[in-house]
């Protein structure tokens, strides 16, 4: 008897990569920079985006796609800080966003008015790392309330990232977190990583984050 194996995962991933390439081309046509924001649950993605939208949302023509497993709570929080549509993507339990969901979300956004798109991925340090969403860069948030060994335990996430943002630094006096060791562990996995350290609650370090976002977007056309 002949056994035929169907490599379903490989086909699904290949289709996702095709769609991600289409998303990337679509964004490039409109001059939009897209960042894929990833982390474990509770690392501060939504709080950081709230501060960012409130202070830089309009100057950078910023839009957000907010992914979540079961609710649109994060999208509702973010919508309070911008007049633009915050596109919620509820995955129905899936542990990551995919390129098809991002493509569908773009259909509801006025791309001609956007320079910066931030995709808030589902809180998970495993699944999102494998899925290209058509972004230009990947940013991983790494809270000081997590162990310094997170990059060693979840290496693919950090291998695929461009930036690591160490968050909740206001809690450093109260938690046993060694920032230097955490950075060393990140660099052991991916020597090309770049770093920022900040607290969205106190505002410490936000200047570096805001400068990074300003550098990431295309300049405004002369009036």
Image: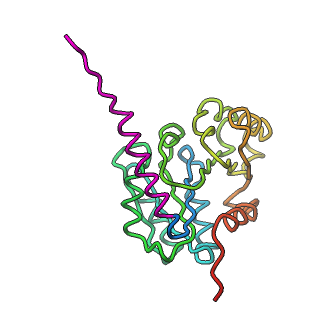
Tell me if residue 47 comes above or below residue 168 in the rendering. below
Seen as rendered, the residue at the extreme right is 180
Q: Main secondary structure of the magenta part?
A: helix
At 63% from the left edge and 39% from the top edge, which residue is drawn?
Answer: 158
Seen as rendered, the residue at the extreme top is 1
Residue 31 coordinates in the image, percent (x, y): 55, 69
Which quarter of the figure is the N terminus placed in? top left
Residue 13 coordinates in the image, percent (x, y): 41, 39
Based on the picture, tell me whether residue 4 belongs to the magenta stretch.
Answer: yes
Between 30 and 124, the one lying in front of the other is 30
At 47% from the left edge and 44% from the top edge, which residue is drawn?
Answer: 131
Residue 118 coordinates in the image, percent (x, y): 54, 61
Image check: 182 left or right of 26? Answer: right
Q: Quadrant of residue 10?
A: top left
At 65% from the left edge and 35% from the top edge, which residue is drawn?
Answer: 151
Number of disc labels: 0
Q: Quadrant of residue 208?
A: bottom right
Which quarter of the figure is the C terminus placed in? bottom right
Q: Which residues are magenta?
A: 1-27
Based on the picture, tell me whether residue 79 belongs to the magenta stretch.
Answer: no
């Amino acid at each position: 008897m002949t056994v035929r194996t169907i490599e379903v995962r490989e086909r699904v991933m290949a289709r996702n990569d095709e769609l991600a390439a289409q998303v990337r081309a679509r964004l490039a046509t409109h001059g939009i920079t897209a960042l894929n924001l990833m982390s474990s649950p509770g690392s501060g993605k939504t709080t950081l985006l709230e501060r960012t939208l409130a202070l830089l949302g309009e100057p950078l023509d910023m839009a957000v796609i907010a992914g979540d497993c079961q609710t649109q709570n994060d999208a509702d929080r973010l919508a309070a800080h911008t007049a633009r549509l915050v596109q919620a993507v509820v995955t129905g339990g899936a542990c990551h966003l995919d390129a098809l969901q991002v493509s569908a979300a773009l259909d509801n956004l006025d791309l001609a008015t956007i320079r910066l798109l931030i995709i808030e991925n589902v809180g998970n340090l495993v699944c999102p790392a494998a899925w290209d969403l058509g972004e230009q860069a990947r940013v991983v948030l790494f809270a000081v309330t997590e162990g310094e060994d997170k990059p060693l335990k979840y290496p693919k996430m950090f291998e695929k990232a461009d930036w690591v943002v160490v968050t909740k630094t206001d809690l450093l006096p109260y938690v046993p977190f060694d920032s230097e060791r955490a950075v060393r562990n990140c660099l052991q996995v991916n020597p090309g990583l770049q770093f920022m350290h900040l607290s969205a609650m106190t505002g410490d370090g936000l200047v570096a984050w805001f400068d990074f976002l300003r550098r990431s977007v295309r300049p405004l056309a002369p009036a």
